[in-house]
Amino acid sequence: MTDVATMPYLSNQTDIDDWEVLNTLIGQIYESVLHPEQWNETLAQIRDSLCPLNWDAAFILWESHNPPSARFVAASGLAAGVQDIYANVFGGNNLWSQRISRFRNGSVVDSAEISSREEVAESPLFKDFLRPWGVDRLMAVLLDRRGGERLGMILAGPSDRDLSALKRGLRVLAPHMQRAMRISDRIASLKLAEGAALLAANQSPFGVISLDQDFNIIAANSRTSSYERAGIITTSGGRLAFVHSSSHKSLLELAQSLPPTGKAFNAVAANGTECPVLGARLNPQSELRVGGIAEGASLIITLGNGPGETPVVQINRVKQWYGLTPSEARLAVALGSGLSLADYATERANSINAARFLLKSVFRKTGATSQAQLTAMLARLPIEAET
C-alpha cells in the first residue's frame, strides 16, 4: 500500500507522473471494494494527491431531499461532530446538494459553475456552518442513485485555489469510483444472501450438504458434524462419503443419474442405526472467473428427520416389504419407533378404535402378534429393501 506522505501531488507534472499517481489511486479504490474499512484512507489519498492547499475535507455520502437526510459512508479531514451537524441540520437541505442532485451519474460537478461566491456567502450553509473553515467551494462526483437518494464523493475547500489538477484527476477517477461502488454493493448483496442462506440452513433440523460432482464439500450446515460423530458419514479431505458401503453406493448412483433427479435411501451407521437421506442431483453450477470456470454444486444431500417427523424412507420400505397400505406402514413405523397406539391416534387425530382396527391389519400382513414383535421385525429389515 502506498504511503500517503510519499504520494506526489498531481499538479505541474509530466503526463507520465500524472498517470502514475492516478493508477495508484485507481488501485486503492478497487482495493477498498474488498476492504470497505479502507475507504477513509482512500479518500485521504485522493485528497492529498489531487487537492490544492487547505482542501482538507473529503467524504462520501448518501443524501436525500424528501425527506432531507444525509448518511456518511466514509470521510477524511472532517472535524469532530461535523458529520452529525451536517446530517441533522443541513443534509439534503442546502444550496449545493439541491442543485447538484440534478446532474446525471458519473458527472464531475464544480460548485462554482452552479452558484456564485456571493450566493454561497449568503446561504445558511456557509454563514452558520462553513464560515469558520473558509470552505466556500466543492467538487462532487455523482456515483449512484437509489430511490430518492444520491450517492456522491465530495471534496471541499476555499475557492481561491487552482482546481485544474483536481478536475482533471476526478474526471479520470469518476468511472472507477462508480464501478467500485456498484461492485461493493453487489458484493454486499451477495454476502447478505449467503449469510441468510447459511442461517436458514443452520436452523434446519437436518444436516444439509452441497457437493460438486466429485463429492467435494462446497458448504455444510452446523448439524452435519453430528452425523459424522454418529459414524454415518465421513468428511475426510473435504469430501463426503458414507461409512456403510450400501449407503455410499446409493450416493454414487445418484451422482451418475441424469439431472435433475432425486433419490431417497437409508444410510447406516457403524452401530447399525439408520438415518434417512434425501439427495438431489442438479444441473452442475458454474461461473466464469479470471483464469477459467469455477465449479459449483452438483448434489444437495440432506440427512435425518425433523423433530417429531416419521421417516418417509422407512415408511416406503416397510410398505413395500410387507405389502402394507401407506396408512398401515405409517402406523407400523410409528409403533416400531416406540410410540404408543394411543399417542399415534392422538397425533393423527384418529379414534383409538380406528387405530386398533388398522393395527389388526398390520399384524395380519406382517405376521406379528404384538407391538414388541413388530418392532423387532422392523429392526431386522434388510437394507436392500431400500428404494
Image (cartoon, rainbow, N blue to C red):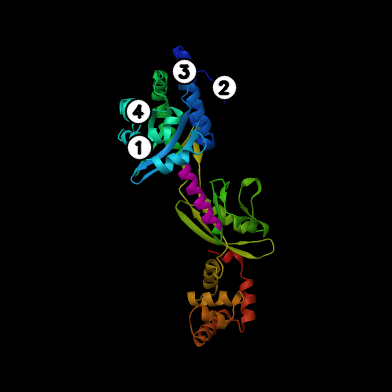
Q: Which residue type does callout 1 highlight?
A: Asn
Query: Alpha carbon of mark 4 to alpha carbon of mark 1: how far?
Result: 12 Å
The part of the chain drawn in magenta is 186-202
Query: Alpha carbon of mark 4 to alpha carbon of mark 2: how far?
Result: 28 Å
Q: Report which residue position mark 1 lands on.
A: 94
Check whether the beta carbons of the residues at disc 4 and disc 1 lie within 8 A of each other.
no
Q: Report which residue position mark 2 lands on.
A: 5
Q: Is residue 70 above or below residue 110?
A: below
> Is residue 2 among what the camera can see?
no
Q: Report which residue position mark 3 lands on.
A: 10
Q: Residues within 10 Å of mark 3 (few under 14, many from 20)?
A: many
Q: Which residue type does callout 3 highlight?
A: Leu
Which residue appears at 62% of the width and 75% of the height?
A: 377
Which residue appears at 55% of the width and 72% of the height?
A: 318
Check whether the beta carbons of the residues at disc 1 and disc 2 lie within 8 A of each other.
no
Q: Earlier in the sequence, mark 4 or mark 2?
A: 2
Q: Is residue 256 above or below residue 78?
A: below
Instruction: Please name which of the two marks, 4 or 2, marks the residue nearer to the observer.
Output: 4
Label 2, secondary structure: give it.
helix
Residue 158 versus residue 7: which sits nearer the camera? 158
Question: In the figure, is residue 243 to the left or right of 142?
Answer: right
Q: Which residue type does callout 4 highlight?
A: Ser
Horizontal and vertical percent for residue 178? 40, 32
Label 3, secondary structure: give it.
loop
Residue 8 versus residue 316: which sits nearer the camera? 8
Horizontal and vertical percent for residue 140? 38, 30
Instruction: Please name which of the two marks, 4 or 1, marks the residue nearer to the observer.
Output: 1
Q: Earlier in the sequence, mark 1 or mark 2?
A: 2
